[in-house]
Image: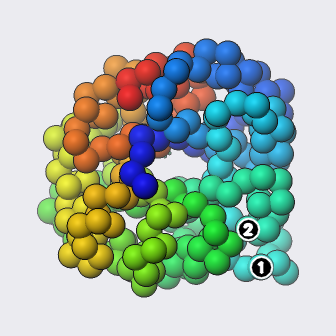
Amino acid sequence: MRSKIVAGNWKMNKTLKETEALLAELSAKRPDTEAEIIVAPTFVNLATAVSNLASSVIQVAAQNMHFAENGAFTGEIAADMLLDIGIDTVILGHSERRSLFGETDDFLAKKVDTAMAKNMRIIFCFGEELQERQAGRHFAVVEGQLKNALFHLDANAWQKIVLAYEPVWAIGTGETATPEQAQEMHAFIRKTIDEKYGASVAQNVTVLYGGSVKPSNAEEIFSKPDVDGGLIGGASLKADDFIEIIKAI
Ligand code: PEP
């Protein structure tokens, strides 16, 4: 089901105390909205976040997980560990996982399969790098990322997928895609999905934009017809900024 979502990816930020303080502030200031609000703190603080938000509509997601059931994967986290503490949404394919930790489309496809087998919801991130856009290859890159990691799924599985188009050149750089660039790519993403799965899947998938969304630009980006919300990095670390972005939707 297509829905409006504002999700905050906290990355490797916030100690336990800071996490609790930010969650309390978000809960207190949260505006009434039909949009889903999701936060993704670091692994060690997930259980606390779930418990502190037990009576809140704010949901908690993980930033990553491994594809294996369990075993000798030092430092990794399995799906069952997340499910066990009440987390059924996971961000996969973030550009930092791809560029800094070498995660490829094929590797991500395995994680996608595990998440599906465990009936988890995925926020799947993808997007082109600056030189790919400059070379006019951005549509081909995005198409390839979708096809390689997700197009082996059957149509039903798409109910559990949220897409997050995040041009790498806009992540954490302060440089944002223009609302027109975001809309153009989101429309292309839906067209690509339509060609493979048909209009119903394409129209029902939620497609978020990520890349330096802030209070000053959120409303214009979210006003575009194929943009269903945002995945927010830096601006999700300050309650007032994140709240302003939620209000913009
Ligand atoms: C992100 O990391 O997913 C992101 C969009 O970061 P920022 O908002 O800081 O660009």
Left or right of residue 168: residue 81: right
Q: Residue at x 47, y 35 (%)?
A: 35
Q: Residue at x 43, y 55 (%)?
A: 1
In what element is the residue under mark 1? loop
Provide residue 59's location: percent of width, then percent of height: 65, 41
Provide residue 247's location: percent of width, then percent of height: 43, 21
Position of the C terminus, as image quadrant, is top left
Q: CA distance from mark 2 to mark 1?
A: 7 Å
Q: How many marks?
A: 2
Residue 220 found in image quarter: top left
Type of amino acid under label 2: Ala
The answer to whether the beta carbon of the residue marked 2 is less than 8 Å from any atom of ligand 1 is: no
Foreground of the two, 93 or 26: 26
Q: Is 43 above or below relative to 161? A: above
Q: Residue 79, labelled with which disc?
A: 2
Provide residue 188's location: percent of width, then percent of height: 20, 60
Type of amino acid under label 1: Glu
Query: Label 1 crowding class (10 Å Cα cut-off): few <14, some 14-19, many 20+?
Result: few
Residue 198 found in image quarter: bottom left
Q: Earlier in the sequence, mark 2 or mark 1?
A: 1
Q: Residue 69, labelled with which disc?
A: 1
Q: Residue at x 63, y 55 (%)?
A: 89
Residue 37 found in image quarter: top right
Foreground of the two, 191 or 164: 191
Provide residue 83's location: percent of width, then percent of height: 77, 61
Residue 138 visible in this rendered orientation of the protein: no
Q: Are marks 2 and 1 in contact (CB under 8 Å)?
A: yes
In what element is the residue under mark 2? helix
